[in-house]
Image: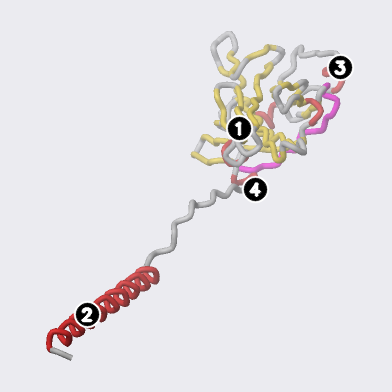
Amino acid sequence: MNEKTKNTIKKWTIIIIAILFAVFLLGTIMNISRKISPPPILPEEISYSEEPTDWVDDNGKTKEIRINEITKGKGYVEGGTQQYIDEEEDLWTAFKMDGIYNGNVFALEYQDENNKTKMRINKKMNPYDGIIEGFIVAEIENASEEIIWIHIFVDEDWKQQIESTKIFFGMFYQYWKQFKFTEVSKGIYMDKVMDDPSRHMEDFAISAGGIIVGDVIPEDIINNNIENKTLMRFS
């Protein structure tokens, strides 16, 4: 073997060794990189409380009903209407609120002839200001099985002035119960009923009847009597 051939073999030997070393080095670097790379960041799962005591924010004198918490992020209030959007169930619907004070129908707030507020329907309440306040929130637990909970909140002023409060509900308001004043925050009371699924039609696009909360009796409902009555309605 002449000198030229020896040099060629030596040259290729060095090149092959260099290539093998480079491949080994690259593999080692990639392996180290995989070991020290941080785990992928997964989106944080939002959790909601099932405890009614967590559904009221205490802001000092004012208490605020946490609609987002109750509806698990699917509901919000716009004016006198609770909007409800469930993208997973492809559901959109709305519930309207209004009230009656001493026989006078009003939207969200009733003032007397002296412009003094006597009753208010609002998610924000002051339990000790002498103004009757209440609010209602619908929670659609299962749309396909039509499980709908109606959560009713009233304040201390309501309890003192309308102690014999009743809840009427259903397509024809045919069901009723005495309101149970369960305190969920200081001066804020809650009760709930399961809505009548038969009053909702066409995937909640059409509804009949609703919920009435106030100083009414079955005869008032039958005769559609609101004279001197104080209540709030949800439909």
- The residue under label 2 is 12
Q: Position of residue 203 (x, y in %)?
A: 72, 28
- The residue under label 1 is 85
- The residue under label 4 is 51
Name the quadrant of the N terminus.
Answer: bottom left
Label 1, label 2: how far apart the Cα atoms are: 71 Å
Asked which secondary structure carries label 2, the reply is helix
Give the colour scheme of this rendering. secondary structure
The disc, 3 or 4, on the residue closer to the chain's N-terminal end is 4
The disc, 1 or 2, on the residue closer to the chain's N-terminal end is 2
The disc, 2 or 3, on the residue closer to the chain's N-terminal end is 2
Q: What stretch is highlighted in magenta?
A: 172-185
> Residue at 72% of width from left, 36% of height from top?
143
Q: Where is residue 185 in the image (x, y as percent from the top left)?
A: 61, 42
Name the quadrant of the C terminus.
Answer: top right
Residue 66 in view of the camera: no
Name the front one of labels 1 and 3.
1
In the image, is 216 to the left or to the right of 62? right
Label 2, label 4: how far apart the Cα atoms are: 76 Å
Q: Nearer the viewer, residue 183 or 16?
A: 16
